[in-house]
Amino acid sequence: MMPKIPRAGTVMAAASILTVTACSSAAEEQVSEDPQVRPADADYGACLISDSGGWNDESFNQSAYEGLMRAVEDLEIGYDEAESTYEWDFEPNMEEMLEAECDLIFGIGFNLQETLNTSADAQPDTDFALVDDVFADEHENAKALVFNTGEAAYLAGYLSAGMSETGTVGTWGGMPIPSVTVFMDGFSDGIDRYNEDNDADVDLVGWDKETQEGSFSDDFADRAQGELVTEQLIAWGADIIMPVAGQSGLGAGDPIADAGAKMVWVDSDGYMSTRYGDVVLTSVMKKISEAVYDTIEEGEADQFGSETYVGDLENEGVGLAPFHEFEDDVPQQLVDDLDRLREEIISGETVIESENAPT
């Protein structure tokens, strides 16, 4: 492993790295091994700045961190990281990464857009990558990594409608922003498609695609608030719920388990990454780890480009996770329908219309 990049001529031991409770054993090994010091003259360094929720959010921050750790292992690069708790952490964290002379700096989440946009303009010799949002301005040294999760969420909505026993499913978000509501739009359309195909009448609570109004925790880190929102959807009859809220979404786990309901996780495979695997029907996966890794690999090979990366079903940048413990419970006809719909989306026969989809 290549330890952290020294800042301002000092050396940093790997023992000082924040230990992340990651689902990936490889990532876990890399943040907990014996102290080593990275030579100050290493050829390339990649760095991450988290959004609120931190590296152990069991969602998008953690996925990005795992991509970095895999690149550190495979490419033998240097690295550094800065964990954000509040929005006012973004600028000082960016200053730390610039002080560490990182070659490539990632901002994880839309909240970092302004900080990265300003830094990309002021630091033309450093490359920047923004996960889950596009840059306000065009920069030759800045790349956006976004994901059309509405496509995979469409499949999750269809599946959830087919598996619901109450005839009501639900979804809620952390904040009403495009990278969240695109999940909810696709989920809604998938339910509508199930109703159309099967002459059914499954209801969705927590989101109205037409009005773009719904249930939100207004936070990506507050699990208690996530629990309250989930309890409300359960009270409305939902027996399958998709929280789109990072670490706040973990608050859904206990009330869903207590109600004997099921959860659709997002970003990572929740069966693997959360403690609530026994209630996770599937997950709408956003391949952040792979996108981070690929971007680092391009940068290390001096092939960094500013063209926006859009992950979708066709390039496998998004997808559904396995059903794991529910594998035997999902009817074969429903499995076949999901395979057919996936091919329809890839071919363009079925298009998920959403004003929140990345372009």
Image (tube, rainbow, N blue to C red):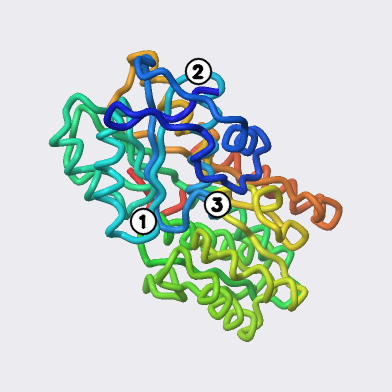
Question: How much space separates mark 3 and mark 1, taking CA atoms?
Answer: 27 Å
Tell me the element at label 1: loop
Dot 3 or dot 1: first in sequence order is 3
Quickly name the residue at label 3: 56
Between 1 and 186, which is closer to the camera in this rendering? 1
Quickly name the residue at label 2: 75
Q: Nearer the viewer, mark 3 or mark 1?
A: 3
Q: Is residue 98 left or right of residue 254?
A: left
Question: How much space separates mark 3 and mark 2, taking CA atoms?
Answer: 23 Å
Whether residue 109 is visible: yes
Q: Residue furthest front?
A: 10
Quickly name the residue at label 1: 356
Between 243 and 100, which is closer to the camera in this rendering? 100
Q: Position of residue 126 (x, y in %)?
A: 24, 27
Position of residue 7 relative to residue 196, above or below, is above
Tell me the element at label 3: loop
Q: Position of residue 52 (x, y in %)?
A: 41, 58
- Identity of the amino acid at label 3? Asn
- Identity of the amino acid at label 2? Leu
The residue shown at (53%, 73%) is: 226
Q: Specify the quadrant that holds the N terminus.
A: top right
Whether residue 314 is visible: no
Tell me the element at label 2: helix
Q: Position of residue 124 (x, y in %)?
A: 16, 28
The residue shown at (57%, 59%) is: 190
Between 266 and 34, which is closer to the camera in this rendering? 34
Position of residue 62 relative to residue 66, above or below, is below
